């Protein structure tokens, strides 16, 4: 029995994101990426990494974006380390922008894999965490996801997967992800830009900067602004209900 016309193309359209994630997983472990996502490893290798960036000023940011995308797609721990590394190696602005692009690309890849290849399996295993954020994503997808990105109350991997499981449109997911991770990413990139000496001494950088009022209050304000459309729609529903 022959497959219907276009059946093969649709099949590959469903499995290619999963294949890319699996390929990235194999490459990451082969390269030992999971072993270097720590402050100790970054401090020990920072001079070597700086030399590579100086030798390859155009290729190095592209390689960094690809590595960040792989780590995000595979949900590897150490996103903060990678973001600080971007600031350390490229400075606040180029490092922050590269981290935003890499994290967004990896999130989109995981989103596509979850939607087309792993949706049913993941839905049965996401448990109560998914149940807590599903209603908001279903009602007010963009605003709710943007608020979750600005104030990360839930794990990054869950916020990548949950929108796929509720069938959120890809442009909505990509737009809210890109905008939502910009503020926090640039804060950590700015910390990374000045953390070289701390890492060289084998000490941990102070990440409590994200909790300081000068940083946290603007993030909370942006999150509240992103939820204003939700509050407006609910007020109108109650008024006419």
Image (tube, rainbow, N blue to C red):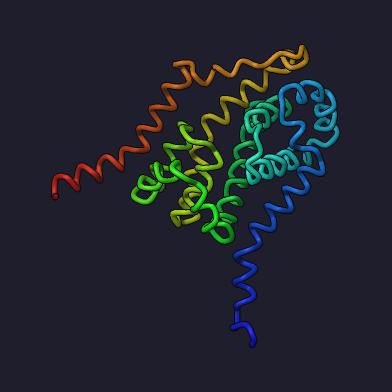
Q: Left or right: 173 with respect to 240?
A: right
- Image quadrant where residue 228 sits: top left
Q: Left or right: 240 with respect to 186?
A: left
- Rendered residue at 48%/54% (across/down): 165
- Rendered residue at 81%/29% (across/down): 49
Q: Nearer the viewer, residue 212 or 190?
A: 212
- Image quadrant where residue 223 sits: top left
Number of disc labels: 0
Residue 26 screen position, x and y as percent: 77, 49
Q: Is residue 165 visible?
A: yes
Residue 164 screen position, x and y as percent: 50, 53
Question: Is 207 placed above or below 103 here?
Answer: above
Residue 83 screen position, x and y as percent: 65, 30
Q: Nearer the viewer, residue 111 or 63?
A: 111
Residue 22 screen position, x and y as percent: 70, 53
Q: Is residue 174 visible?
A: no
Q: Residue furthest left?
A: 240
Q: Left or right: 230 with respect to 59?
A: left
Q: Residue furthest bottom?
A: 1
- Rendered residue at 59%/50% (across/down): 110
Which corner quadrant holds the N terminus? bottom right
């Amino acid at each position: 029995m022959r497959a219907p016309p276009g059946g093969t193309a649709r099949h590959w359209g469903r499995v290619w994101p999963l294949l890319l994630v699996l390929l990235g997983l194999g490459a990451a472990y082969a390269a030992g990426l999971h072993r270097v996502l720590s402050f100790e490893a970054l401090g020990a290798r920072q001079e070597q990494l700086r030399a590579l960036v100086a030798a390859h000023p155009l290729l190095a940011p592209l390689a960094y974006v690809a590595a960040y995308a792989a780590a995000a797609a595979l949900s590897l721990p150490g996103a903060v380390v990678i973001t600080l590394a971007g600031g350390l190696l490229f400075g606040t602005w180029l490092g922050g922008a590269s981290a935003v692009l890499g994290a967004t690309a990896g999130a989109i890849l995981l989103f596509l894999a979850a939607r087309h290849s792993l949706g049913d399996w993941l839905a049965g295993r996401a448990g109560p965490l998914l149940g807590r954020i599903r209603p908001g994503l279903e009602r007010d997808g963009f605003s709710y996801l943007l608020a979750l990105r600005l104030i990360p109350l839930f794990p990054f991997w869950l916020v990548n997967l949950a929108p796929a499981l509720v069938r959120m449109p890809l442009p909505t997911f990509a737009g809210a992800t890109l905008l939502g991770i910009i503020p926090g990413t640039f804060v950590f990139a700015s910390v990374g830009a000045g953390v070289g000496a701390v890492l060289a001494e084998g000490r941990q950088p102070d990440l409590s900067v994200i909790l300081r009022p000068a940083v946290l209050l603007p993030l909370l304000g942006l999150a509240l602004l992103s939820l204003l459309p939700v509050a407006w729609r609910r007020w109108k529903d109650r008024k006419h209900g």
